[in-house]
Every structure is written in C-alpha cells, then in structure tokens.
Image (cartoon, rainbow, N blue to C red):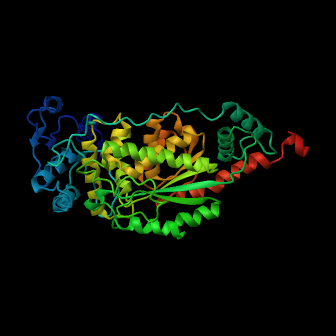
Amino acid sequence: MRTLVLGGIRSGKSRWAESAIAESTGAGQPVHYLATGASPEGDPDWSARIAAHRARRPSHWSTVETIDIPTQLRSKIATPTLVDDIGGWLTAMMDRRGAWAMGSVGSVTADVDDLIDAVGAFPSPLALVSPGQPQPAAGRAVRPGGARGRRPAVDREGAQPRGVPAVTEFPSITPPDPEVAAAARTRQDRLTKPPGSLGRLEDLSVWVASCQGVCPPRQFQRPRVVVFAGDHGVTAAGVSAYPAEVTAQMVANFDAGGAAINVLAEAAGASVRVVDIAVDAPEPLSPSIGAHKVRRGSGNIAVEDALSADEAAAAIQAGRQIADEEVDSGADLLIAGDMGIGNTTAATTLIAALTGSEPVAVVGRGTGIDDAGWARKTAAIRDALYRARALSADPIGLLRVCGGADLAAMAGFCAQAAVRRMPLLLDGVVVTAAALVAERLAPGARQWWQAGHRSTEPAHALALGQLELEPIIDMRMRLGEGTGAAVALPIVRAAVAALASMATFDEAGVTA
C-alpha cells in the first residue's frame, strides 16, 4: 500500500497520514517515521508544531530526522514507513544543491528520480505527506513541491512601500436591473416551450436583458474584443515554451488580422483591437496600439517587483480609459483578451495568492511546457508568492509585486466595464486572474461578467469558483487572446435571439 496525503499548512494532513499508516499496520506494530522538517532556530511557532507532532506519535514508532529518504527506504524495507513531508525534503535538497537560482532547478532532478525509484521499490506499507496537489506528468509518480523553509537569497520584502500614490477609487457598482431580470424571467416562462427547457440559454438571456435594462433584450451590434499585450521578465526563468520576442510578433499578427482571435471574432460578429501595455520592444507597432503603453516588459516576479507603484497605478488607469473609449465609441459588449509570453505564470501567481492555493495545485502547462518547464514555473510562482505573502488583502500591491502591467490594465478594464454598466465576457486564466483582482478593486463588478469558457489551466477553475461564474463552454482551449470568449459569443447571441424573437403562447395561439 502506498498512500499520498495532500494538504496545505495546518490542514491536518500529517495527523491523517499517521492514522492511515497505523490502520494499515495494525495496533502495536512498529512504524518508521521519516521527518524532513528539522526545527529551525528562531521560529518558535514552527518548533512548537514539530514538538506537537513528536508528542502524538506512539512510543513504539521510531523517528529519524533526515533528508536522505531513499537510503532510509532501502534500509527499512520490512518496516511500514511514513515520510513527512516531501515538500520539506525538496526544499532541503534545493538548499543542498544550490538550486534556488533561476535555471538551476534541474540540479535536483537526479535526487527526485532516486526518490521515485526508492518509493516504487518499497514493498511495505508507505505513506507520504506532501503540500498541495500534484499535477500528472509522464514518468513521475509524485510531484513534490511547495514547502515552508528557506527561500532564495534574492527574496525581497513584499510589503507595500511608503509613499505609494493612491489609485482613483472605483465608484460603487450598480448591479444589473433586477426588475428587468424579473420581467425577462417571466417572458421566458411564457415562450412556446416548457419552462427551463432552454437551460443555460435562458439564464444568459435574463443576464443580458438586466445588463441592457430592457426586455426583450437587443441583439448585439458592436461587440468588441480588446487584446492586452505585455511581456513578463519571468520568462528568463524558462517558464514558457516560446521565446519572449513572440509577443511583439503576435501584436503585428493581430494588427494584420492573421491571429486566431481575428478569425474567431469575425465569425462571431465582433471586431478586435490590440493594445501594447508592456511589450518588450523599443517602439510600439503604431501610435494607436501604443497609446497606453506603461513600460517595456514587467519585472521578473520571482526575484523583483513586476511594477513600481506609479506604474501599477498607470496601468490600472490605462485599462479604465480603454474601457471608456470602447463604450463611448458604441461597443455594446466587451471581451478582454491577452497576449504575452510568461503571462500565465504571473496570472497563476495572482490566483494562488487570492485563493490561498499552493503552487503545485495551480500550475498548468501554459504554452505546452515539458516536465522541466513545469518545475521551473512552479518554482518561480512559489518564490513570487513568498515575496507577496503580506499582500493577500491588497489587490494593487499584488499587481505591483507579482502581477504585471498588462494584468493591471485588464483589471482596470474589467472593473470599469462594470462601472459603465457594460456586459463583458471573460476569457481564460490570464483574463480571469485580472478579473479576480478587479472584483477586489470594485466589489460587485462580477455581476456584469460572464465566463466565456473554462481553460485547461488548473488555476482557471479556482478563479471562476471564487467569482462564482459558470463557464459557457468547455472546449479544452488554452490559447488566450480572447478566443474562448469569442467562441462563446454566438451562444450568448442565440440566448438573446430566443428571448427576443420567440413567440409567446398567447402570440402563437398555443395552449399553455
């Protein structure tokens, strides 16, 4: 029997693992307890927790504090064993190998392989405790990661510095019209169909009507996709399958109409605008594209702040102005899209910080990274989260420390759309991360949004759950650009058409 027990700090995972191994071996049987978390000096809280762990172990259990888990497993093959925990072991091995520097995490690969081999060959009952939730990967039985322990020497304090200029507060958000929503629901029940038989289409039609303040709702005439482009310094950590220069190249592709979002938006009856918020290029592609540019690339969040305080404020304001421009130009539905190599790393960090999740539970494959890339991405997010550990209640501080200019601009855009009473479709993990921040900036803004789709990124489901938004489609998409929302747009159009154009029982002379 091999049992992997997962959970966050103080989740009770160690106690549960102890119960599980005791139950599998029987009362009074010896257990070999391998403790990887030695008590650090100067941390009384951590020392007290370790003392509590020791106190509750049965006297007939043997305890060894060690990080040489493979040797211990191979020497005690006849004794049921509990390893607590894998995260502490990995932290210690990275300390030993000097693997905290960017690009050097591969130096612990042989240690991980050795551990996996020892676990695979261990013939007796074995329980392993690990923080978080592993992601499946070819050739890996266990995905260790995340731990309380020493962090890289490059860590900086994540507290908000003094003298940060205040960002203009968002006004209180007025919800979509509840009386119109009630009228739309009543009309749905009078259409020539059994009540509720159009399922989610009925809910979407009620939402559109309440956003527009009229029943029946009007069909969309000028839906608009805005793609926010920006580079991220964390790409230097090898977190993406593509080089950073792709961002600028894709901005040109959007402008030329050759990207996926251009094609899908056209099919859905929407137009596309691309804005350079933080592309790492000397000059914007054009004055209009670069009108709201904040800087060239955001900082490497694993080792430094993404933005200065002034830049974070400027990026949020840029997003607000872009939303105003689109609404004032006649847009009747907005879609936020994204483009930026490395942006899923920053987005996942924001989501982890705002949902209290550990890196291994939220890190996905992004642009299609391999196992080594996944490990580098996880390490970068872990380090960024440590730097931002004091900012979970400070949305602007999170954008500054572990977000990016494009994410800040998207947050301002999503919040301002709600201020302007404009319905908005969210796209994937990057846009939804920005929306999660926007809801903190302007509570209630989420009532003006719908989730276009569900991305394959694990963090996306967490963010949607926090926002209490149900995705319209789930097509295993992970491109970004606004493509998932664009594919969902025809469904929203169909919902509007059904409520506005279907006959009622009275109009059709059908007996209800």
* Percent x, y of residue 256: 52, 70
Q: Is residue 320 above or below residue 455?
A: above
Relative to 435, is 302 on the left or the right? left
Relative to 340, is 65 on the left or the right? left
Disc tally is 0
Q: Is residue 224 above or below residue 357?
A: below
Q: Quadrant of residue 418?
A: top right
Q: Quadrant of residue 47?
A: top left
* Percent x, y of residue 510: 89, 43
* Percent x, y of residue 105: 20, 59
Q: Residue at x 34, y 41 (%)?
A: 398
Relative to 197, is 131 on the left or the right? left
Is residue 510 shown to the viewer in this render? no
Among all residues in the image, which is located at the extreme right? Answer: 509
Q: Is residue 453 above or below residue 176?
A: below
Q: Residue at x 29, y 57 (%)?
A: 233
Relative to 465, is 493 on the left or the right? right
Q: Residue at x 16, y 41 (%)?
A: 31
Foreground residue, 84 or 17?
84
Is residue 512 shown to the viewer in this render? yes
Foreground residue, 499 or 291?
291
Foreground residue, 110 or 59?
110
* Percent x, y of residue 408: 41, 46
Q: Quadrant of the C terminus?
A: top right
